[in-house]
Amino acid sequence: MLNAIEGIHHITSMARDANITDQFHTKVLGLRRIKKTVNFDAPDVYHLYYGNRAGQPGSVMTYFPFPNIIDGVRGAGEVGTTVFSVPQGSLDFWEKHLAENATGGIRREQAFGEDRLYFDGIDGDGFALAAVAGDAREPWTDAGIPAEHAIRGFHSATLVLNDASATRELLQLMGFQEKGREGNTTRLEGEGGNGAAVIDLVSDPSARPARQGAGSVHHIAFAVRDAAAQRSVRETLAQEGFHITPVIDRDYFLAVYFRTPGGVLFEIATNEPGFARDEDPDHLGEALKLPRQHEHLRPYLETHLPAIGS
């Protein structure tokens, strides 16, 4: 069993409109935009990052906003719900706040003894807030969400699969242990970690295959401390027969990717060097930052990428 994985690092989704996506995450969810950069493989498309005050691994939601993307179709083989952690007693505030901002799909439920508030993102993304006691991660409060209610980071992610058994075995190899079952959902949790170490697996043999598009999670990344820890994890996964990419430098972390048995794209990402490597921590996400290989495109990109609100 691997013991280097600390929990979720980031979750990356696809969207249609960069400015609307930015407004929703900064003004409605109250997250901090911690990086404004571009897609490595399609530099005419933004890669936008949102998180808590420090942009800690385990708090970071990222987006590729493709203007002409089709709608995603929810189903098996994807992250179906991204769950954020908020303090206990906050859900009344959030229910009112989300309703005032015309957010769809709002409903209250319980999962594994936790109070949750489910809601839809602007492109139909599946989101929830889980009321959690004692989450000490520092929130971003400059967006007007009171500190006693603000999002701390991720709580968990829910994967929807036709058959969860092989993915459960993979997660157990990655250091997650089964903690319980409710209906067709199995909960796995990493020990210790970064506060975002819960994965729920929904097994639904009748679910149609998901189709990626706006509102779909592109991949979920798991955090390791550094390059040495990532190398060890990569070697173990390769020995287990997973087809895993070489290490790719993403400027703010090193990444390797592989497809799970259930079809979900997993990434293993390093905590180092972090999002402050090229910006002052007090000014994260303000300037357009470009990968080295795309810096020559700056004059074009600065005039052709859509404007993003402050």
Image (tube, helix red, strand yellow):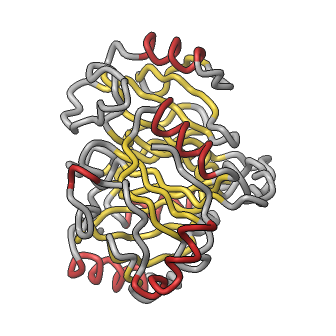
As rendered, which of 36 and 64 lies closer to the eye?
36
Specify the quadrant that holds the N terminus. bottom left
Q: Position of residue 7 (x, y in %)?
A: 32, 54
Residue 9 shown left or right of residue 24 in the figure: left
Residue drawn at point x = 41 percent, y = 23 percent: 114
Q: Is residue 164 visible?
A: no
Specify the quadrant that holds the C terminus. top left
Q: Position of residue 184 (x, y in %)?
A: 61, 38
Residue 56 shown left or right of residue 291 in the figure: left
Residue drawn at point x = 78 percent, y = 60 percent: 68
Q: Position of residue 146 (x, y in %)?
A: 31, 20
Residue drawn at point x = 51 percent, y = 44 percent: 309
185 versus 160 height, above or below: above
Q: Is residue 96 visible?
A: yes
User: How many numbered discs, if any?
Assistant: 0
Residue drawn at point x = 29 percent, y = 30 percent: 141
129 versus 88 height, above or below: below
Indicate the quadrant where residue 63 lies: bottom right
Q: Position of residue 107 (x, y in %)?
A: 61, 18
As rendered, which of 198 and 74 lies closer to the eye?
74
